[in-house]
Image (cartoon, rainbow, N blue to C red):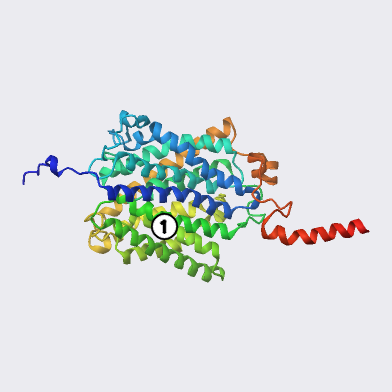
Amino acid sequence: MAPAIMLAADAPKLSSANTGFMLICSALVMLMTPGLAFFYGGMVRVKSTLNMLMMSFISLGIVTILWVLYGFSMAFGTDKGSIIGWTSDYVGFSGIGKTDLWPGYTIPVFVFAVFQLMFAIITPALISGALADRVKFSAWALFLVLWVTIVYFPVAHWVWGTGGWAFKLGVIDFAGGTAVHINAGAAALGVILVIGRRVGFKKDPMRPHSLPLVMLGAGLLWFGWFGFNAGSWLGNDDGVGPLMFVNTQVATGAAMLAWLVYEKIRHGAFTTLGAASGAVAGLVAITPSGGAVSPLGAIAVGAIAGVLCAMAVGLKYRFGFDDSLDVVGVHMVGGVLGSLLIGFFASGKGQSDVKGLFYGGGMDQFWKQCAGVFAVLAYSLVVSAVLAFLLDRTIGMRVTEDEEISGIDQAEHAETAYDFSGAGGGVLGSLAAPALAATQSKKVDA
């Protein structure tokens, strides 16, 4: 059959509804980075709270500027050898018109660019959780610049850029299992193998200082993830976006429950930290697979990720690598599971007609997923380790041992998260003031 000829009247036209929807999704994904900051910030000790918050927040500034200058062009520009993209009009956004549409879609290029920017921002921020308590803030900022340039922008092109080798191979990654989570988790492992363990690892208690902050962060991540996942279909009106929205909720609930059941059997308690971590594991696992599986498949993906990620977080004690906040166990392992399970649970009724093994599709898609997963994992692990090594040997990656023991917040930011030196205002201050005044009066009388 001769190919259909697209007339000018048939070409995509700007959709105000889709544009508005994608702007909302972009804002939701942006909210995930502060959510991640709270999630990580509550999991560290008091003396590292602000540093953990700042390691996420600084990405909002650095990556935004790099994305406008050259990142968008590298990730989504015209393909160059299936490895990288480049379009000069995207450099500095100088050649993008306000009404130019993203090819094949009904949203402006600016909207697509800002949506993808939010992915680029949160990905390196994920790495920071593995490095808690011990990395110089200036070294982290420089690592962030190098990492997004050498690792994230090219990998995003491999996976999502037209002409990228993984894209052409047929690797399915709906919203970032490989480009975001495996990429960040493998990078985290590479860096911590270079910089070493925290002072007191396996000896001193390193419990979360604020589980309410952890739960707040997990809730913000869960909320923002609907924009992260459902928005990745770019507003197309074919039902895949709503399917992804439903599967995001379903898989996350299943993973949280599975983690808690495993935790109860293994450790004897249902913990708040386990509920939050299980939810994030489910969100990670459904990110690459949610457009390809049914809701029942999403339950399976979430439950499997909940149990296996809960098991994986303990590996750091067995193998001796200090992944402070379980970035490897949750994001790398969760991303690997979510990506590979597509090869088994793809229903053929979602984003494409590709079927997994359990739906009669054989192992073909599984092997494609393996190629994407392990290529990204290996590349990110090796390059991240090399970058950390070079920075450590030049400017130094770690604070001094004394600064780490006394607290990285004070050493790097000259601040503390909580000031207990005075009663202050508010209810506590008003209740404490009369008692303090009475005490001072007795001292004067004496």
Residue 212 locus on image (x, y percent): 57, 60
Q: 423 left or right of 321?
A: right
Residue 103 locus on image (x, y percent): 24, 40
Residue 418, placed above or below residue 265: above
At x 46% / y 48%, what residue is drawn? 185
Q: How many numbered marks, from 0 up?
A: 1
Residue 100 locus on image (x, y percent): 26, 37
- Mark 1 element type: helix
Residue 433, quarter of picture: bottom right
Q: Residue type at mark 1: give it.
A: Leu
The reply to whether residue 172 is visible in this rendering is no
Q: Nearer the viewer, residue 414 or 84?
A: 414
Q: 93 left or right of 237?
A: right
The reply to whether residue 419 is visible in this rendering is yes
Task: Quarter of the image for the C terminus: give it.
Answer: bottom right
Q: Nearer the viewer, residue 443 or 73?
A: 443
Q: 438 left or right of 184?
A: right
What residue is shown with label 1? 283
Q: Nearer the viewer, residue 347 or 341?
A: 347
Q: 128 left or right of 203?
A: left
Residue 345 locus on image (x, y percent): 30, 61
Q: Nearer the viewer, residue 100 or 352?
A: 100
In this view, which residue lies farthest toward the right?
446
